[in-house]
Amino acid sequence: MKILITGINGFVGSNFTEKWRESHTLYGIDIRQPKVKGVVQTYSWDELQDVPKVDAIVHLAGKAHDTKNESLAQDYFDINVGLTKKIFEYFLQSDAKTFVFFSSVKAAKDSTEGVVLKEDVVPEPIGPYGESKIKAEEYLFRKLPEVDSLNKKLFIVRPCMIHGPGNKGNLNLLYNVVSKGVPWPLGSYENRRSFCSIDNIAYVVEQLIVKENIENGIYHVCDDEALSTNELIALIAQSVNKSPRIWKLPKGLMNTFAAVGGALRLPLTKERLQKLTENYVVSNEKIKKALNIDHMPVSAEEGLTKTLKSFQDK
């Protein structure tokens, strides 16, 4: 297949290039246009009309969630909605048959306490990142009749936290803490979270492109198994040949400490404690059914072990 990937030089795009370049002809759009092995050419957004005919477009480009809350809310909408409209209008006029939009589970829910997140949930995003992603989704759904009339395909994928080689997010920060032997003080909290290996999301998107008769719509993508933070800490410790140092301090003590953490500008605040200990479990049954598979190619433990090893190899 001839595939155009927007945001091709980012974390996800770089990994897709690595995995697909032997099987497909790849073109890119990005704000940076370095020469990359396996990519015929990368264009700027102003050069969109110069892109050759392709079979599919994978739209990765967007503004990622800012964990430091330093970005302006409008920036999310300008990029996550604005660029989506621009590339999708190009798709409708082009010969490409398949469009894959990268949204996020955060477009559906910011928290999933007590439930497993499925595609039929009524979206309740919190914050400009999730809100901008759902706005982009709503725009695409309004275009579905036109997509159908042109005999094209539209897939919206909502991955969980994607990890893999080159990952620079919270998992990398946690790895740095644990690898230095710093104890994990939140062992008393039992939570479960869904993750998404870059191997699994690359497999899913490729299948959406090459397979026929997959229904248009939204698909959540994650590893088959949800893991607790304590299990993740243990995997990180194992990857650096250390014993996990998990302290089960009383929840009341940690809640009190977090309550005053914000005022004292301490690392642990009430909001951060909630994010570190909350449940966020996602179902991937719909996408597995669509692809006619029983399980994802890579297990959660296998994928995380591979990612953690990549941190060592840097």
Image: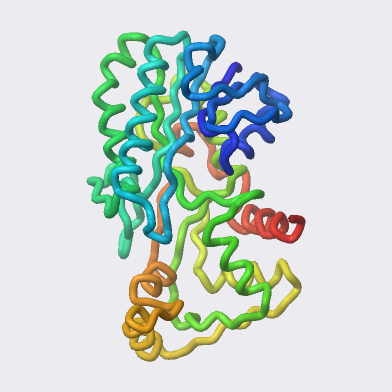
Left or right side of 218 for 228: right
- Residue 198 placement (x, y as % from top left): 59, 45
Quadrant of the image for the N terminus? top right
Residue at horizontal 67 percent and vertical 24 percent from the top: 39
Q: Is residue 97 visible?
A: yes
- Residue 103 placement (x, y as % from top left): 40, 39
Residue at horizontal 27 percent and vertical 37 percent from the top: 135
- Residue 212 placement (x, y as % from top left): 49, 19
Up-down: is 169 above or below 97? below
Up-down: is 138 above or below 93? below
Quadrant of the image for the C terminus? bottom right
The picture quadrant where one finds residue 275 is bottom left
Count of number-bearing discs: 0
The picture quadrant where one finds residue 189 is bottom left
Residue at horizontal 38 percent and vertical 77 percent from the top: 269
- Residue 21 placement (x, y as % from top left): 69, 27
Which of 132 and 289 lies nearest the eye of the viewer? 132
Q: Is residue 286 visible?
A: no
